[in-house]
Amino acid sequence: MIEFRSVSKTFADGTTAVRDFSLVLPSRTTTVFVGSSGCGKTTLLRMVNRLVEPSSGQVLIDDVDVATRNPVELRRSIGYVMQHAGLLPHRRVVDNVAVPLRLAGVGRSEATSRALAALETVGLDPALARRYPRQLSGGQQQRVGVARGLVADPNILLMDEPFGAVDPIVRDDLQQELLRLQRELDKTIVFVTHDIDEAFLLGDQVVILRRGGEVAQVGTPAEILADPADDFVRTFVGLDKARRTLHVEERAGARIVVDGDGRPAGVLGPA
Amino acid sequence: MSDNVFVGAGQWLTDSAHWSGTDGVPARLLEHLGYTVLTVVIAAAIALPLGLWIGHTGRLRGLAVALTGSLRALPTLGLLTLVVLWVGIGLTGPILALVVLSVPPLLAGAYAGLESVDRHTIDAARGLGFTEWQVLTRVEIPLALPLIVGGFRSAVLQVVSTATVAAYIGLGGLGTYLIEGVQIRDYPMTLAGSLVVVVLALVLDAGFALAQRSAARS
Ligand SMILES: Nc1ncnc2c1ncn2[C@@H]1O[C@H](COP(=O)(O)OP(=O)(O)O)[C@@H](O)[C@H]1O
Ligand SMILES: [Mg+2]
């Protein structure tokens, strides 16, 4: 369980990125922080592994304040997928992925074979393993970053817009892969995105944020859709848009789901 | 006259008598290289830890900039004379002067090299759980290596050429041919000596250029 207790962060330049944020993230579930750029998502995420120290308040993992933990050990115990991949430019792709294992004391050859397996998990061609990061596209680099986050099988996984640069088809694959991993491995995942569809797809708990890390609404996707807290949330999740306002029409004896513009979106299956 | 000097220098260089013994080119060359290595090793022992610390922490950066700037502005010969007057004739004085001259490029190479490393990369390394020492030795130094080697390149060239001047206070090395040549008006010897220094500098520079390129590639 991860818990934010009245956490605030004001940076040295005076920017207040997060103001009095409190939330409990249950173990073995996925919590998604969603909000537009600059609302404090990354700052919140980086407080969990102490890359950002809160100006006030505490972050606790299993009831232990992370401020009391050794930051190096803390970070090694947590998988972190960075917003812009964050690969080491002087190391080959496979060696980048192997870093968390090597830091954990795993031998070179075992680390390499596990790194290759992780690259396969994220659907990267093994031929890319010997390349350097700069020889990969932005989307491929992000997948390497995801492989590196998963490779050491950490209990907690922090993912900062991990699929932002990958193309839509690959993104669908990776999202499905993450859902599968979550079903099988039961990790505590904190996932950051600005894409509400991705948030609803992946999140057991979705946190919609406004500027300054202010919580607009917390709930399951269904709870948020059923009962949006205010107009900001209604607009943010797209309830004012035709594609979210569906109804059923009888056509040629079948029950068709139709969106707000009257476009067929699918059929109503058996419950 | 000038033709004769060139011809003379050619004859001097091809005379086998000048390629053996304690005053021969190989011996003087080794002496020269010995002083260069000694100087640069001492300077590096001072400048590298300091430069890496400044580059890693970002502290005292202003001091480093001022220090490298002002040390670089020192006139070589003046400094040499001053140090020799201060510590007396012998090895210490000239070596000290040469160390002072080679500290700035080494210091600048180290801290500028570390500053050139992308902040995101360092942040990523911390996020993965590298210790500060691992960040320095496994991320910052490898990525800064081309500029660090560049610092050595400047320092070594600086010392190789300046050590020539140092012969006038009895340091030996290749400068001996220049100083003695002028004193006894043996200009072919002076020219031959300078040619050897020039070739040495060019060879070393080419070697460092290669090292820098391979550091940048990895
Ligand atoms: N190191 C920093 N120093 C100063 N301001 C920062 C720093 N990091 C983030 N900020 C500011 O804090 C706010 C929130 O940033 P961030 O958490 O990165 O937002 P998000 O990830 O939601 O886009 C932004 O206004 C950003 O400019
Ligand atoms: Mg962000």
Image: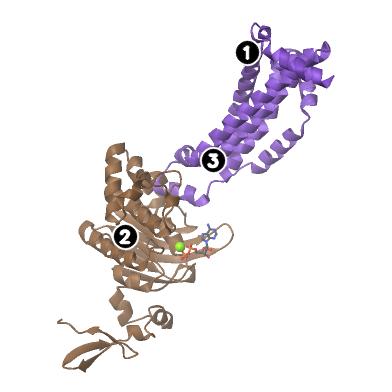
Chain colours: A brown, B purple
Relative horizontal placement of residue B92, taking residue B131 as reference (left or right): right
Give a yes or no on whether discs 2 and 1 share a subunit. Answer: no
Give a yes or no on whether discs 3 and 1 share a subunit. Answer: yes
Residue B3 lies in quadrant = top right
Q: Residue at x 42, y 83 (%)?
A: A231
Residue A189 lies in quadrant = bottom left
What is the three-letter code of the residue carrying label 2?
A: Ile
Q: Residue at x 82, y 10 (%)?
A: B184
- Report the front residue among A226 and A161: A161
- Position of B194 relative to A224 (above/below): above
Q: Position of residue A226 (x, y in %)?
A: 30, 82
Pointers 3 and 1 in contact (C-beta within 8 Å): no
Relative horizontal placement of residue A74, taking residue B172 as reference (left or right): left
Question: Mark 2 highlights which residue?
Answer: A189
Q: Give neighbour class at mark 2: few <14, some 14-19, many 20+ (Cα, 10 Å).
A: many
Q: CA distance from mark 2 to mark 3?
A: 35 Å
What is the number of the mark on residue B26? 1
Q: Give neighbour class at mark 1: few <14, some 14-19, many 20+ (Cα, 10 Å).
A: some
Q: Position of residue B160 (x, y in %)?
A: 67, 24
What is the number of the mark on residue B144? 3
What is the number of the mark on residue B176? none
